[in-house]
Every structure is written in structure tokens, then in C-alpha cells.
Image (cartoon, helix red, strand yellow):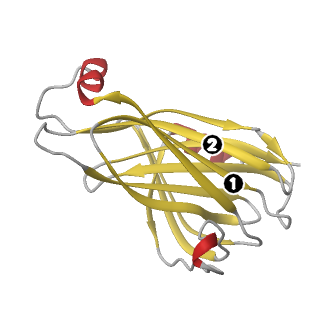
Amino acid sequence: MRKLVILVIIGFQLSGCATLRNEFDTRANMGMFGGCVSGVVVGGVAGNVFGALLGGMIGTATGNFIGEHYDKKLGTREEAMLKHRMKDREEKLLVEASQMHPRTATAGSVINTSVRYTVVAPSDVREIKITETRMFFSDNEGFIKLDEREVLRTQGTFSSAFKFTVPEKISKGDALVITVISSDKQKDSVTSSLKIS
């Protein structure tokens, strides 16, 4: 687990999902799902120096995660371009910060996570389709998709908060919550450590 945490902190991107099955009881509780990820490939790259490929990880979900979202726009395109010293036709998708509370939890606990990211494109692009993917990983459960949604963003900086409940049947130990923000052209990710006690 320790080696995995080091690799993920170095920086990884979620490259793909071989198969995924989501089951929803009703349209009203689309935030709840159970299922499994039978194939996940995770690649990690930081700068031009480090690279890692973890393949063939198999995870099974043992319970249901219930989640909800809260979004807020924090800054404009012009503010983002000044902050990151960008040129007019430059494109960028950048995860700037993340938070998670609490960092230690038990079954049934509510976990609050948030990520701040910036998306900038040429000025004539009005909206950009963004995919926000959140994953849970532990040695015993493997990878579990907490949530994935597509949103249309105007250019600028956004805060995306996600709250979920740890299921009753979850193994104790170290875990990771992984957030991947992607567009058609770019991708960035961030990880947070979580201890289940």
C-alpha cells in the first residue's frame, strides 16, 4: 500500500476502465450504486522523469456509496489567464487544490471532498464538456467508482464538492480517494488519503 501511495502522489492519471457495471434502484437515488470494476489501468507520470503503470487491478464493491454534489464558480477566464500567465489561444485544464474531511472515518461516516480546477480555452469557445470522476481504492476492495458526471463549464476556475457516505461493509485500513478531471483534450488528477477505522 505504501508503494502505491507514493506512486499516486507522484502523480497519476486514470487511463481507462475495462468494464464497469452500475446498478441504480430508482431514478431518485442515482447517487447510490453498487458494482465492481473488473479492469482498471492506472498510469502515473510526473514531468519527464517518473513513470509508472499499474495494470490488472481487480476491485469488487462490497456496499453502496451515496453521494451529492455542490458547484461554485470561483474566477473568470481573464483571472485564470493572468494567474497562470497564459497566452490568448492557449488551452489548459489544471487541478489546483483538493480538500477532504475527515481524513479518518468509520463505516457510515460522511466524507466531504472538494477539488478546485481551472479550464481555459480560446476566447471563442463558450462551453467545455468536463468529466469529473471520483474513485475509491483500498487493498481489499480494489478500485470502486464513487461517481462520474459530465458538466458543461464556461471558462474559469471552479470548486466541485462531493459528499459521500462510507458503506457499512467496508474493510478497515488505508484507502485513497482519487479525483480525475478531464476534457476531450486534457486530463488532470489528484489523490487524498483516507483511513477507515
Residue ranking furthest to the front: 28
Tell me if label 1 and label 2 are in contact, CB under 8 Å: yes
Label 2: which residue?
A: 113
Q: Earlier in the sequence, mark 1 or mark 2?
A: 2
Neighbor class of circle 2 (other Cα within 10 Å; few <14, some 14-19, many 20+) is: many
Instruction: Look at 63% across and 42% down and name the residue there.
Output: 113
Callout 2 secondary element: strand
Q: In the image, is residue 12 above or below residue 95?
A: below
Neighbor class of circle 1 (other Cα within 10 Å; few <14, some 14-19, many 20+) is: many
CA gap between label 1 and label 2 equals 8 Å
Amino acid carrying label 1: it is: Phe
Instruction: Look at 76% across and 71% down and name the residue there.
Output: 63
Label 1: which residue?
A: 164
Left or right position of 155 against 25 = left
Q: Nearer the viewer, residue 58 or 123?
A: 123
Give the total of numbered labels.
2
Q: Quadrant of residue 112?
A: top right
Residue 181 spot, x, y in % from top left:
42, 49
Left or right position of 73 against 156 = right
Q: Nearer the viewer, residue 28 or 123?
A: 28
Instruction: Look at 13% across and 38% down and name the residue there.
Output: 122
Q: Nearer the viewer, residue 73 or 131?
A: 73
Q: Quadrant of residue 168?
A: bottom right
Left or right position of 131 against 100 = left
Residue 139 spot, x, y in % from top left:
74, 60
Callout 1 secondary element: strand
